[in-house]
Image: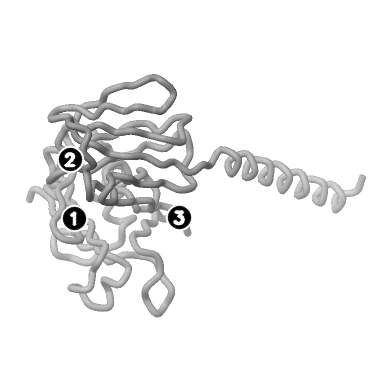
Amino acid sequence: MNMDMKKIVFLLLVVFIASSNCLDLCAQKKDVTGCVVDMDGKPVKGARIGVVNTKIIEKTDKKGEFSLKNVLPTDSVVIYLKGNRGSRFLLGDVTQLLLKVKSDALVIDNGKGSTNSVSVETLVFKRYGSGSVITAQMIERNGYLTIKEAIKACIPGISFNYSDGEDKIVIRGSKSLNLSTDPLVILDGAETTFSAANQGCHVNDVQMIEVIKDGLGYGAKGANGVIVIKTKK
């Protein structure tokens, strides 16, 4: 077998493995429906349900019902209740959920005859309009090691990739004329890149991270969203 033939065989093998992995992942994806009720069994309207590290986020309707499409058993789900209170849990192998909200706990009925309870606590960010704020106290409490890790763990609807040797973050997709997906990043009042901020600023020095999905107040530069980072200086 000559060298060219070996290259062709190798490439075909790579394509086959990649296709198999993709098919396996697609086979695991499913749609999940659920309902959120209070302690008296009444529907909870307007609760937000998000899937961590994806752009999936839904609101419960007037019946307390919601649906999550194309999710995986390994996905973590966050339910946002009043203010900045909520719970986080692993989805698992279910297609239906009944979530009962108590004052200090969320009871999860998976529709298979078993239930478990997770605590309702202050989540790692507070919302102000279209912005999500991660505080220094929450960073310390959860032990995040980088800015990227804090955002990735706390805020649904945000995606990350690695390109040209740099960490990239996508908040809204491409809204700018040059088709870039890079958000505007401001560190202590100065414009920078997400990669530079993530690598150059230690997360323990951060006072606040605000992720603004609707960056209209920042003009054209904010079309893809805005990340404002303030340190403890």
**Relative image position of residue 86 (x, y in whole percent):** 20, 38
Mark 1, residue position: 210
Compared to 30, does 214 lie above or below?
below
- Residue 39: image quadrant is top left
The type of residue carrying mark 1 is: Glu
Q: Earlier in the sequence, mark 3 or mark 1?
A: 3
Mark 3, residue position: 165
Compared to 218, does 97 lie above or below?
above
Q: Earlier in the sequence, mark 1 or mark 2?
A: 2
Name the residue located 36 percent from the left edge and 44 percent from the top edge. 51
With 22 as the anchor, is 114 left or right in this view? left
Name the residue located 53 percent from the left edge and 42 percent from the top edge. 29
Mark 2, residue position: 204
**Front-most of 145 and 39?**
39
With 219 as the anchor, is 163 left or right in this view? right
Compared to 204, does 113 lie above or below?
above
Q: Residue furthest left?
A: 233
Q: Are marks 2 and 3 in contact (CB under 8 Å)?
A: no
Q: How is the image coloured?
A: one colour
